[in-house]
Structure formats: structure tokens, C-alpha cells
Image: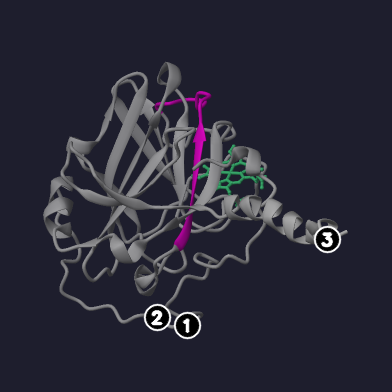
């Protein structure tokens, strides 16, 4: 009788571990040896997909990003979403073309079709020192200009966040025509998920120096202070990044990767 009265407590203990597994992965500090850039980086142990982000001390419009991932048979693609969904935020995809890397911005209208190319005032400038493709792995380091915008993903005020939610996706199958930046992409069969980007820790006084490796002057130094945005204020992201109330993707645990 006494032992049975403990049963409800045992059940609670049993379920606790599965609750903790549902939380998305968080970025950590990572210094890339090719460029010397220190990123806040998400890394999926199962897929080996990595995405790092570096920011100026006082972010305004630009960030530096780095994607690196396996490309079996020199094919497949990897991508990031600037907020916590596939449909809505700005997406950046990259794939190998021989020993080069091709990339394009995409905007998904739904979760059924390959997201079409999109254009705007945003632009990507590769950092050649950190960009390579060797047949089985590729790495793409870039300056993303005019990419910090609450309508695209995170706003400057969101860079105070210790956990802004972004997304990643990886495919091992070949894109339709690797030479065409607007090519049709196959489904992200290798994995996809959201992760918490510790944007507050991604800031560095060395940003200007790193951005100069892109061969173009960074459009902002580290001189304009950015006030912390109040949650839900107009200057903050219009996406749900940082919130944990978006459980649309709770059913995709088989694709989880941390
Ligand atoms: C042919 C191309 C694509 C198809 C058919 C596709 C399809 C889908 C589907 C069906 C889901 C929802 C799965 C679920 O909730 O269980 C999903 C989620 C997701 N996709 Fe895609 N996708 C494509 C391309 C992309 C690209 C290019 C990116 C990013 C660069 C991306 C990023 C994501 C992310 C981050 C999620 C998880 C968050 C969410 O559910 O909104 N996808 N995709």
C-alpha cells in the first residue's frame, strides 16, 4: 500500500527527460580557423550541419554568417531561416558547384514547393577565405548586408536576445541545376529544425575587421548604439523568434538534431 502511493511521483519522474529533449538547441562560441571569426554557432551532431553568426557590438543592418555541412557526392544544399519558421522569414540557401559555392535568397509561400528566389535591398558578399567546397563538405562564409530587419527575421533590437529562434535545413539530394541560383531545391531530407541563437553573445568589436574580408566595406561599424527593444515593440521582429509558443514543429522530433 505504502509503495503504491509513490506511483504518481514515479510517473512524473519518468516523463521529465522527454520534456527536456523537446527544447531546441542553443548556439555556443566557436572560432573558425580559416577566417579567425568567432561565431555563436549551432551545430547538429547527427547531420554535421553548422551555422554560425557574428554581429557588430552595436548591430544595425549587417551580420556575418557561416554555414558548413557535408555534401555527399558534392550534391545537396543547406540553408537557414532568419526566424523560427520556413514560410515567412528570409531564407538563404547554398550548395556546391564544383569547388565553388552558389547561394540565393528564397521566400517560401508554402511548405509544399521549392521556395522561389526573392530580391530586396539585402545582399550577400562571400568571404573567400572561409568559402570552399571539396567534394564531400562545403563551407560558406558571408557578410549579409541589410539582413537585420524585423520584416525579414530579427531586428536590431532583437540582438539583445539570449535566444532568438532561427531555423536550419539540410538536403543530401542534388538541386535541379547547380549552376542556376534560382534552381529548384529538393526537400530537406537530411534534417530541419529551429535553434536558439544567442545573438547577445554574437557581438564583437572585431566585426568591422572580419567584414572587411568580404572585400566590401561593412555598412556599419560598431558606433551606433542600438536601444534594447521592448518585447512586441514595432522595431522588433514580426516573427515569433525567441518565443516558445510556436509548437508547429513539435511533431518532427524524428528530424531533431542537436
Ligand atoms: C522543396 C523545398 C522545400 C520543401 C518541400 C519544404 C517542406 C517543408 C515542410 C513540409 C516542413 C514542415 C515539416 C513539419 O512540420 O513536420 C518544413 C519545415 C521547415 N523548413 Fe522547409 N521545405 C523546403 C525548403 C526549405 C528551405 C529552402 C529552407 C531554409 C533555407 C527550409 C527551412 C525549413 C525550416 C527551418 C522548417 C522548420 C520550421 C517550420 O516548420 O516552419 N525549408 N519544410
**Where in the figure is residue 80, as x and y percent of width and height?**
45, 47
Q: Earlier in the sequence, mark 3 or mark 2?
A: 3
**Magenta part of the protein: which range?**
164-179
**Where in the figure is residue 87, as x and y percent of width and height?**
59, 54
Evaluate whether residue 153 shows in this view: no
Mark 1–mark 3 Cα distance, whole angstroms, equals 54 Å
Choose between 24 and 240: the one closer to the eye: 24
Q: Secondary structure at mark 1?
A: loop
Q: Does the magenta run of residues contain 85?
A: no
The residue at the point 41 percent across, 36 percent down is 181
Mark 3–mark 2 Cα distance, whole angstroms, equals 54 Å
Q: Nearer the viewer, mark 1 or mark 3?
A: 3
Q: Which residue is label 3 attached to? A: 2
Determine whether label 1 and label 2 are within 8 Å by CB. yes
Determine whether label 3 and label 2 are within 8 Å by CB. no
Q: Which residue is label 1 attached to? A: 233
The residue at the point 58 percent across, 54 percent down is 20
Q: Is residue 68 above or below residue 26?
A: above
Q: Which residue is label 2 attached to? A: 229
Q: Does the magenta run of residues contain 174?
A: yes
Q: Is residue 189 left or right of residue 35?
A: right
Q: Where does the N terminus fall, quadrant-wise?
A: bottom right
Q: Secondary structure at mark 3?
A: loop
Q: Is residue 76 left or right of residue 17?
A: left
Q: Is residue 150 left or right of residue 37?
A: right
Amino acid at each position: 500500500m505504502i509503495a503504491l502511493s509513490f506511483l504518481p511521483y514515479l510517473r512524473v519522474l519518468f516523463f521529465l527527460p522527454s520534456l527536456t529533449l523537446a527544447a531546441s538547441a542553443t548556439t555556443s562560441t566557436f572560432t573558425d580557423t580559416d577566417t579567425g571569426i568567432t561565431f555563436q554557432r549551432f551545430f547538429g551532431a547527427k547531420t554535421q550541419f553548422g551555422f554560425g553568426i557574428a554581429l557588430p557590438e552595436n548591430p544595425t543592418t549587417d551580420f556575418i554568417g557561416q554555414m558548413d555541412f557535408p555534401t555527399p557526392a558534392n550534391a545537396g544544399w543547406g540553408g537557414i531561416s532568419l526566424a523560427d519558421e520556413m514560410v515567412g522569414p528570409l531564407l538563404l540557401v547554398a550548395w556546391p558547384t564544383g569547388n565553388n559555392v552558389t547561394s540565393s535568397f528564397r521566400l517560401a509561400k508554402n511548405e509544399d514547393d521549392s521556395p522561389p528566389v526573392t530580391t530586396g535591398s539585402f545582399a550577400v558578399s562571400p568571404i573567400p577565405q572561409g568559402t570552399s567546397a571539396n567534394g564531400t563538405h562545403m563551407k560558406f562564409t558571408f557578410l549579409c548586408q541589410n539582413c537585420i530587419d524585423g520584416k525579414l527575421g530579427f531586428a536590431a533590437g532583437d540582438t539583445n536576445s539570449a535566444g532568438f529562434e532561427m531555423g536550419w535545413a539540410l538536403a543530401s539530394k542534388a538541386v535541379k541545376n547547380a549552376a542556376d541560383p534560382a534552381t529548384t531545391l529538393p526537400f530537406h531530407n537530411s534534417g530541419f529544425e529551429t535553434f536558439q541563437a544567442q545573438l547577445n553573445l554574437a557581438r564583437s568589436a572585431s566585426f568591422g575587421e572580419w567584414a572587411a574580408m568580404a572585400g566590401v566595406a561593412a555598412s556599419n561599424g560598431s558606433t551606433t548604439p542600438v536601444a534594447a527593444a521592448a518585447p512586441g515593440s514595432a522595431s522588433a521582429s514580426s516573427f515569433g523568434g525567441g518565443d516558445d509558443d510556436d509548437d508547429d514543429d513539435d511533431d518532427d522530433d524524428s528530424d531533431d538534431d542537436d
